[in-house]
Image (spheres, grey):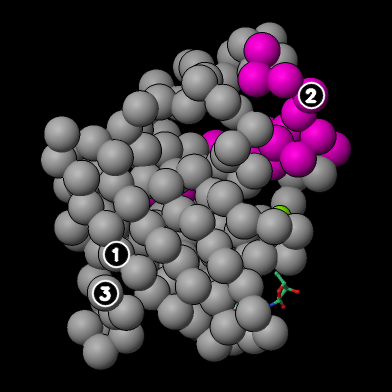
Amino acid sequence: MNERKLTIETKSPAETEALGERIGRAVEEGVVIALIGDLGAGKTQLTKGIAVGLDVPGLIHSPTFNLIHEHAGRLPIYHFDLYRLNSPHDLDDLGAESYFYGEGVSVVEWAERAGDRLPADRLEIRIAADDEHRIFDITATGDESSKSLSRIQYPASRIKK
Ligand code: ADP
Ligand code: MG
């Protein structure tokens, strides 16, 4: 399995959005971005940037009451917020598989709640927060996500490891 990693630190919400934009520009169709981090970590902030990078017009908001919002961009973006998901099983009723394995880009907040419903090949982003600092640990867990990760353009000086 082709696994890749990238760790990036941001120091403001704007920097997080800019990182998201670079990710959004890099991802190819069908990629699933799994966001894992506490409340306030910056999952939605990053997603806003990803949407900008995918040329989605207008601002996106957290899909608090609907578990999923779809937006049209360079590729469709399926924005999930699974905070209120009771069990991975409930994803089946939402038809989540057709999104995860569809041609758009899925961005999943609280991805750990999806359990085994998440595709094995995904861009997994773990966010650790400390004041205004955020560490984004990005792991591509398969060939498709690795291709997208290798396309992320980020100044070498800002990459932690
Ligand atoms: P989540 O979706 O993970 O619950 P949000 O993206 O909604 O989190 O909120 C992140 C919060 O943290 C915002 O209030 C934002 O202003 C603040 N923040 C402070 N520093 C950063 C940073 N470096 N990156 C992202 N958000 C930050
Ligand atoms: Mg959020």
The quarter of the picture where the N terminus appears is top left
Does the magenta run of residues contain 75?
A: yes
Q: Is residue 153 left or right of residue 25?
A: left
Which residue, as the protein is rendered here, is positioned at the far left? Answer: 2
Q: At label 3, which amino acid type do we have?
A: Lys
x then y, percent, for residue 65? 85, 38
Task: Report the amino acid beneath label 2.
Answer: Asn
88 in relation to 37, above or below: above
Answer whether residue 64 is magenta in the image. Answer: no
The residue labelled by disc 3 is 161
Which residue appears at 27% of the width and 58% of the height?
Answer: 5
Q: Nearer the viewer, residue 69 or 67?
A: 67
Q: Is residue 89 left or right of residue 57?
A: right
Q: Is residue 84 left or right of residue 33?
A: right
Choose the circle earlier in sequence order: 3 or 1. 1
Task: Determine which of the numbered discs, if any, sits on residue 129 in the image.
Answer: none
Which image quarter: residue 91?
A: top right
Please tell me whether mark 2 sits on a helix, a strand or a loop: loop
On-image quarter of the C terminus: bottom left
- Provide the secondary structure element on which disc 3 rests: loop
Residue 11 percent coordinates (x, y): 54, 87
Q: Which residues are magenta?
A: 65-89
**Residue that appears at 32% across and 79% down:** 160
Residue pointed to by mark 2: 86
CA separation, marks 1 and 2? Answer: 31 Å
Q: Pick whichever of labels 1 and 2 is earlier in the sequence.
A: 1
* Residue at image mark 1: 6
Instruction: Name the foreground residue: 55 vs 79.
Output: 79
Who comes first in sequence, dot 2 or dot 3?
2
Please give the count of numbered marks on the rendered protein: 3
